[in-house]
Image (cartoon, rainbow, N blue to C red):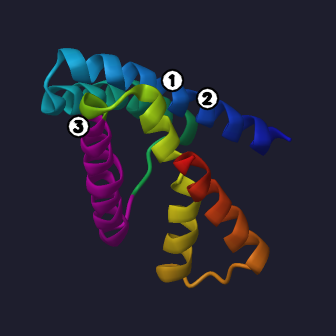
Amino acid sequence: MLAYAQLSAAMALVGANVAVGKLLAEALPVPLILALRCLLACLVLWPLARLIEGRVRVAPGVLRNLALQALVGTVLYNAGLLAGLRLTTALEAGLVLATLPAVVALGSAAWLRERLSARQWLAACLAAGAWRR
C-alpha cells in the first residue's frame, strides 16, 4: 500500500507541475525555468540524499548513465513540456501526457526486452487512445 500511496502522490505532483509549468512558461523563458528547476532540485535534494544515504561513491559508468538520463529524461522532457505548454492549455497537455503508459510499454519492450501480456498492451493502448475523443 505504501508504494501505491507514493505513486499516487507522485502523479498528483505531476499534475500540479503541468499547471504551474503553464504559468511559468507564459512568464519566463524556457531555459531560465529549466535552470531554476535544476538549481532548486540540487539545493533541496543534495542535502536530503546526504542525510538519508550518507556519502555515496558512484562508479564512472553509473555516473555517465545518470548524466544521460538527466539530459534526456529531465532537461529535454521539461523543455518539450514547457514549449508545448506555451502553445496549448494545461488540460490539453495533461491529456497528451496521459499517453505515458503506452510510451513506457513501448520503451520497456524495445530497450529492456520486457515481454508484455496482451492485457498489458491493451491497457497501454487504451490509455494512449483515451485522450483523442
> What residue is pinned by disc 2?
12
Secondary structure under the numbered disc 3 in the rendered image: helix
Which label belongs to residue 16? 1
| Circles 1 and 2 in contact, beta carbons < 8 Å | yes
Between residue 34 and residue 26, name the one nearer to us.
26
Q: Nearer the viewer, mark 3 or mark 2?
A: 3
> What residue is pinned by disc 3?
83
Q: Which residues are magenta?
A: 58-84
Amino acid bearing label 1? Ala
On the image, the x and y values in percent for residue 5 come to: 76, 35
Crowd around label 1: few <14 · some 14–19 · many ≥20 (10 Å): few
Q: Quadrant of residue 118?
A: bottom right
**Disc 3 or 2, which lies upstream in sequence?**
2
Secondary structure mainly formed by the magenta segment: helix
Q: Which quadrant is the N terminus positioned in?
A: top right
Which residue does the image show at 19% across and 31% down from the upper left?
A: 35
Amino acid bearing label 3? Ala
